[in-house]
Image (spheres, coloured by chain):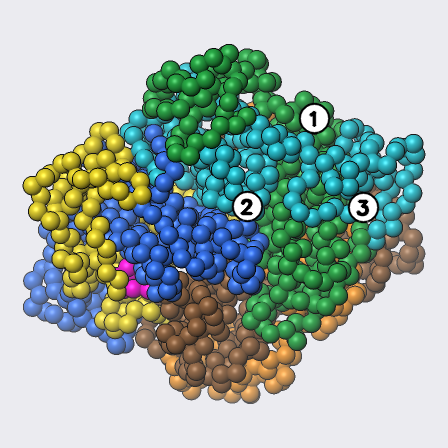
Chain colours: A orange, B brown, C green, D cyan, E blue, F yellow
């Protein structure tokens, strides 16, 4: 059950209203990496995740994201509170749709549930959430760099901070399942190619931990599965992918 | 530069065509978790990722995903090759749009770039990719469970396997940057709340590695940032989040 | 500030799970007339509506809609709890995306903020809300007619009931502004055509309170504003539209 | 049957072309509140509304909205007729897509039928139409305030005027059915909670005609339907919602 | 100026209502290849096409497409007129959204202006229209093959016929400009590669009028524009592309 | 099978980076007329086109379009390589989403498969492709006119050139089937109205090869198929539409 109190979870005090910056802020209200995406993604996962402890975590964080959505909305409302003095061509979105937040991104595209990534398995859900937090953090950094208003910076920095906290929590939960550094999950056994890496984009090739042993590197792969004998790393022992059943 | 040969990277041999299952397969051709999403996401990242080795990895995997898209397309073409004998109401999508693959999901929704998650930072990109692989693997498992055709199962199992391989590669790359288990990245310092966890959804509360010490647990948070003294875990030392500058 | 308790605002007790009906229920979770649309529409209005009392009403109802969204989600989770025994072709959406609710409608289309109608003026907002309630009520009636499960019917009837209550509240608020039966609002004076009605679709023409006096009925209108002398209702006094400044 | 004459229903005479303002005008050509939405919404309703008189009204107004769409298109064509002299960055949409109108909004988002609200019941349809008219009127006001061109203002004022006329007609039709101030319609009886109002957003609470008697006000509602005894308004007689069967 | 009469341009007489087939018919009401796409595409072109005769043709055909949209809508209304006797799972879309047409395709996806192809040049527009007619014809063929109702077949055959007529008209107009078989149009001169054809997909290669002389065939193209000497067709005279300025 | 080499098919050498122009270039990366649309449209057709030679052509051109997508992406990457020196409000899309290409158009709308036109018949597919090439050519012309950078102009001119080449190839293929100037294709016979042209938009009427004999011109058509005797062109012999079976 949702309950609401008419104060934000943390104060929002915009100094000088800047409707143009308000339009940028829409990115975190109705944009792909925004708080609506996070809130709805974590919350909808809580309906199908079976583990009660993980479900509790998802709900705690989802509700916090709703609170962050409210903070971003408040910031937009404050930044558009003096639209009469704003040159209209600098914030056309609010001139057309009215002041305050709307569920569109900074370019006026409607929010869509296609932004949400969830379903079927808790490991998949938690990985999706770590990705969502990374996207949100990235946009907050972009926003912070484009304003000089101390109140706005303080609020955005808090929001960025919390994304790090949430990412940390999701990582801890994945780690508790042994799935933070194990690519495998679910019920289907991988086939014999699980350790092979194909060099399909040739030129300026690089080698690193992601395509060196224990991975088996195919330098010049061909079609129809006719995998040529690996021309490199002849001494590699049989590649093993940590965490797969084959390992 | 893209080059193409008229054989698939691995054989696709569907036994008995089943247009109804072909419609399910669209999920991995033009759906959210499908191969088009993966191919375009990794490839577009390669244009802005500065590290040449990571860029090479992204391009190698992107090209493989294009090859998987081709395999899925081939499977759909084979499954719809006997549409005349199919009861039309069992595969209405192909009856209306024609046989073979289309860039829609199994419910006929057009593929949209809103499915793609990328931009601005390589750590964010790699986390998005691990999430994408998890989603793709999940859908392949769902598909494998819904067919009895050995050729289809073999091909789908290969595709599922490769998602595990790619996830493994992305994890190895993140780990090489020290970012597989560190939530922090980018240039903005988090604020003082980075270790706090709010119990915003109350009832059936659980505690686990994601909200125990070193996290500071606020059992009954209130609005406006008036954080009450933590009623639990009084002995916890100052919480530290691994990898943040504060740590 | 949003707070949450792990019980629904009203119990949800589905009897026999029916995943196929669960797919229909998605219409009110991630569909056009669903609870997400209502919750977000009223809540986003509260950021720009200046009147504190109306704002309070919008927030009260918005939070209730979030609670209804939770109830619908719970119903879907219960209806999909025995998917293993369900013939997969009867509920393909859950087979592909996993059990439980998702932010798509009953045909798998992602929820979009294009469903939301709001902005710029409280009268416009309240009219949009009465329309939203009518759409939601209509879909609940369609759902109730398509299930025999008593627990499902009881919950859906409650949700339908509350839409009537909300519509009533919005009507009362509009009426308090004198705008329930007055088409006029805002700052722009209408021109001299405000009482004219054009018979642009001819054949089987009907007359009623919407095109009789005081409306001026143009039976055979032509282009370029060359309005012919009205051939009917010659005795009508000068038409007056209640509530316009011209009146 | 549609017929067409090559003159607009009313003259459109733009003075000085302003491609930048032309881009704003797209909001009423291919935007959410635009004439295409209105024309298609009312017209599609006419296919399922059973009452012939209401159907005639819907068709008359729908055709007028097509005529308004034509007027807006003409205005955009005139405003973009001197694109060569326009600084391209001031109207990038026309620079990319060509001069004249397109079915996108002022921010370049494609028109979508998700804007349309209709179906299943004439009361629902008419309420949706009153909301559509309010949205259109609001956008016309925003446009009128952002241009100094007398010809443009005259045409926009006419279009705004007609939205008021249409809203008036829809209200008269609803009133003739007794549904302008009655929230109830359709075949399902509401349950016993129809007169209850929940104070779910607490703080700065207000009371007004929408949550005073005959409404029953629950000041501090809890989950699971355990409705506490109402702490306020003890003298209120049993709440009655006008127009419900219970009344 | 649009005018309307309450009879369809041609009679629509559905025999036995079949709501399931009605759902298929939506493809031509609110689908990609449907009449709305055609009507709006041709009509919006008429605002920017400068040639008055072509503009007249576009408007004549656009109005006919509106009339066809009306016919398709009528067919859907007749096919859904006995929904009470229909098993609801056979036509879930109408069960959820109400009987009669809606602006969605046969899978419930909302119509979007992204289906429209137009802008900037009359040659481009006419080519887009020939493509649109071909898509519409294709879907009508698919529909005709899936019904036994004589009245439905007759109406659909008429609609298919008219698409052929329109395609013929657009071809005649293009031919009158000399652009039916000339790929070139507009103001930019092509570069020296205009006659070259790259064999980028290798294996099972074929030659035909599209890659034989006068085209210059590059059998094994490489990156960075280092075009190797053509290994085939050494006797070909200098390739010439009809209609280019270079020719 | 897709293979890749880390050089573009032709060099891309942007001179002075201009992030604002980079945003325009997105139109051909993630926009309606862009290279992704072309690449995916032709390639997906190759799965259902039965004629091996046409299939080979489609694949050759599809792969070239992937290469052009890579060139456009490279141009955008180069144009956004000095974002730090760019005034942020001049290229807000990259400021929010990061430098380099993204699968959105120049106004930030996500690419959607609704842009693709294909299915069911090779004639329909080839006509769709000629239309796609015309749209791409048109946008390249718009782009070339809006930059002064020689390297950018050279690359864009090459891309424009290749669209002409592809259009030429598609025309040659259609011509080889006898379908370049024949509107008819498929299996359904048109009805008796195939040569009739309706003058549905009246005023400033024009006559041309598209509505003169052998077309039968109905100057004043009425509803319900009651076609009046043609008042003009009494001497026209029976109209014939070239290429129809009736001819």
Chain where mark 2 sits: D
> Taking the image as drawn, is residue D157 in sight?
no
Q: Residues within 10 Å of mark 2 (few under 14, many from 20)?
A: many
Q: Which contiguous range is marked in magenta? A: F120-125
Q: CA distance from mark 3 to mark 1?
A: 25 Å
Q: CA distance from mark 3 to mark 2?
A: 27 Å
Q: Which residue is mark 2?
A: D119
- N-term-proximal mark, 3 vs 2: 2
Which of the two marks, 3 or 1, is nearer to us in this view? 3
> Taking the image as drawn, is residue B23 in sight?
yes
D237 w.r.t. D158: above or below: below
Q: Nearer the viewer, residue E171 or C16?
A: C16
Q: Which dot marks residue F190?
A: none
- Rendered location of residue F156, percent (x, y): 29, 49
Position of E213 with respect to E38 (left or right) is left
Chain where mark 1 sits: C
The secondary structure making up most of the magenta span is: helix
Position of D39 with respect to A79 (left or right) is left
Do the numbered discs 3 and 2 sit on residues whose CB atoms are within 8 Å?
Answer: no
E236 w.r.t. B223: above or below: below
Identify the image quadrant of residue C183.
top right
Q: Which dot marks residue C175?
A: 1
Q: Nearer the viewer, residue C71 or F89?
A: C71
Q: Quadrant of the C terminus of chain A?
A: bottom right
Q: Which residue is mark 3?
A: D192
Determine whether the residue tagged by mark 1 lies in a helix, strand or loop: helix
Residue at left 28%, top 44%?
F225
- Rendered location of residue C110, percent (x, y): 56, 54
């Amino acid at each position: 059950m949702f309950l609401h109190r008419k104060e934000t979870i943390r104060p929002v005090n915009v100094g000088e209203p800047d409707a143009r910056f308000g339009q940028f802020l829409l990115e975190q209200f109705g944009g792909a990496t925004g708080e609506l995406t996070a809130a709805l993604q974590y919350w909808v996962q809580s309906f199908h995740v079976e583990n009660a402890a993980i479900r509790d975590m998802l709900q705690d964080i989802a509700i916090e994201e709703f609170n962050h959505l409210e903070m971003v909305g408040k910031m937009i409302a404050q930044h558009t509170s003096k639209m009469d003095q704003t040159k209209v061509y600098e914030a056309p979105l609010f001139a057309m749709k009215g002041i305050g937040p709307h569920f569109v991104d900074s370019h006026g595209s409607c929010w869509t549930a296609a932004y949400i990534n969830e379903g079927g398995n808790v490991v998949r859900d938690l990985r999706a959430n770590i990705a969502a937090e990374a996207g949100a953090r990235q946009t907050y950094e972009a926003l912070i760099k484009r304003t000089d208003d101390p109140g706005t910076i303080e609020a955005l920095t808090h929001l960025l901070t919390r994304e790090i906290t949430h990412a940390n929590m999701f990582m801890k939960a994945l780690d508790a399942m042994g799935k933070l550094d194990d690519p495998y999950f679910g019920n289907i056994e991988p086939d014999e190619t699980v350790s092979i890496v194909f060099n399909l984009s040739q030129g300026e090739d690089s080698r690193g931990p992601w395509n060196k042993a224990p991975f088996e590197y195919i330098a010049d792969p061909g079609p129809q599965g006719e995998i040529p004998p690996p021309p490199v790393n002849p001494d590699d022992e049989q590649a093993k992918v940590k965490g797969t059943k084959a390992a």
